[in-house]
Image (cartoon, rainbow, N blue to C red):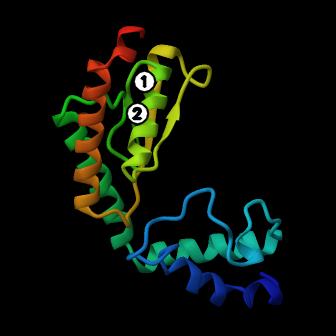
Amino acid sequence: LSVSSASLLPVFRQKLRQPPWPRSSPAPCASSTPSSPQQRLGEAITEEESAAAALEALQILREEPERVRKLQANGKLFYDLANGLNLDTGYSQGYAVIPVIVGSSLIAAKLSNRLYELGINVQPIIYPAVEERAARLRFFISALHTNEQIKSTVNLVAKELKSLKKSRVYKFV
């Protein structure tokens, strides 16, 4: 690394070791206004900054292996709970990205909207990105999620999906 990128390491170390927002506040949504120019999406960063951030992330993984263990445990918890409630997780093996296949783009979009209203931000993956029968919600599990958040989310997904399947909209699918 050059001298300039090496001087960036302390900055990236500090940012990567902190949650992206205070734990007591909700996660920011895409419509939130950035509080500084550095937080703008799409802002160009140099190759040196990118390399410095990647190196620091790898260093944190070496120093804090509990983060990886926590992520693996969270993925397994979500996967086990979802399967226990008969949610279709496809070929997922319980890692950090877990789908819940609902089989209809309309149902996936409606379910995503209902969950968003309940405070859960999950994106639908719909036709033509996947076959219509493979429409799904894709959950990104983090080491920062708590067991209670995961349990609550899986229960809400099952409850809302069941409710949608009983509604008129499901009869058209």
Q: Residue at x 35, y 60 (%)?
A: 71
Tags 1 and 2 touching, CB below 8 Å: yes
Work out whether residue 35 or residue 102 is closer to the camera in this orientation and state it.
35
Q: Quadrant of residue 12?
A: bottom right
Q: Relative to 168, say whether 138 is above or below.
A: below
Q: Residue at x 46, y 75 (%)?
A: 62
Q: Is residue 94 left or right of residue 40?
A: left
Q: Quadrant of residue 26?
A: bottom left
Q: Relative to 151, say whether 82 is above or below.
A: above
Residue 57, image x, y percentages: 56, 72
Work out whether residue 92 or residue 124 is closer to the camera in this orientation and state it.
124
What amino acid type should be assigned to the residue bearing mark 1? Ile
Q: Residues within 10 Å of mark 2 (few under 14, many from 20)?
A: many
Residue 9, image x, y percentages: 66, 85
Mark 2 sits on what residue? 111
Q: How many marks?
A: 2
Q: Residue at x 45, y 78 (%)?
A: 22
Q: Residue at x 64, y 69 (%)?
A: 54
Mark 1 sits on what residue? 107
Of all residues shown, which one is farthest toward the left? 84
Q: Relative to 40, say whether 159 is above or below.
A: above
Q: Is residue 131 left or right of residue 170?
A: right
Q: Quadrant of the C terminus?
A: top left
The answer, for residue 128, to whether it is visible in the render is yes
